[in-house]
Amino acid sequence: MHIKSKIYNKTLYVLLCGELDENSAAYSRDIMDEMFAGTNFSQIIIDLSELDFMDSTGIGVLIGRYKKMKSRNIPIFICNPSKHAEKIFKMTGLYEIMPKIV
């Protein structure tokens, strides 16, 4: 798993690359928590175009980050989901809490 980020116009952009699963969950959680601890952004966009695989542990990582940001009133949006990610987000209803944007 590799995670890239940048801030532009008060938006934190996060690109998840690789597999978000049991093996990468702790690392991914720690890296995203560091990124999300900042205060110079008002929304987060997570790009899933390079996410090859995600299991239930990965879903838990994303939901946990959503809950942390919700307490700070910072919305999270999803963009460019891979086919695999799109299927999971639709099946689980994750788009209801982290909307997909174009």
Image (tube, helix red, strand yellow):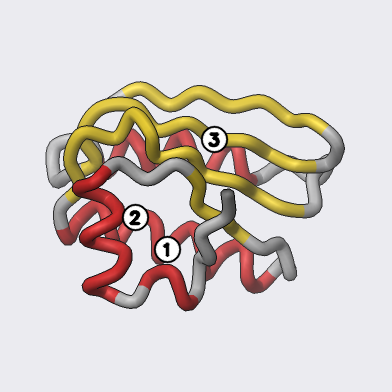
Amino acid type indicated by mark 3? Val
Circle 2 — which element? Answer: helix
At x 60% / y 46%, what residue is drawn?
A: 45
- Judging by the rendered image, the residue that carries numbered circle 2 is 61
Do the CB atoms of the residues marked 2 and 1 lie less than 8 Å apart? yes
Residue nearer the viewer, 90 or 44: 90
The residue mark sitting in front, 3 or 2, is: 3
Do the CB atoms of the residues marked 3 and 2 lie less than 8 Å apart? no
Separation of marks 2 and 1 at Cα, in angstroms: 5 Å
Q: Taking 78 as reference, is 21 left or right?
A: left
Extreme front residue here? 102
Q: Position of residue 96 (x, y in %)?
A: 47, 77
- Judging by the rendered image, the residue that carries numbered circle 1 is 64
Amino acid type indicated by mark 1? Gly
Q: Which badge, 3 or 2, is on the more N-terminal residue?
A: 3
Amino acid type indicated by mark 2? Val
Image mark for residue 20: none
Q: Position of residue 16 (x, y in %)?
A: 39, 33
Q: Taking 42 as reference, is 71 left or right?
A: left
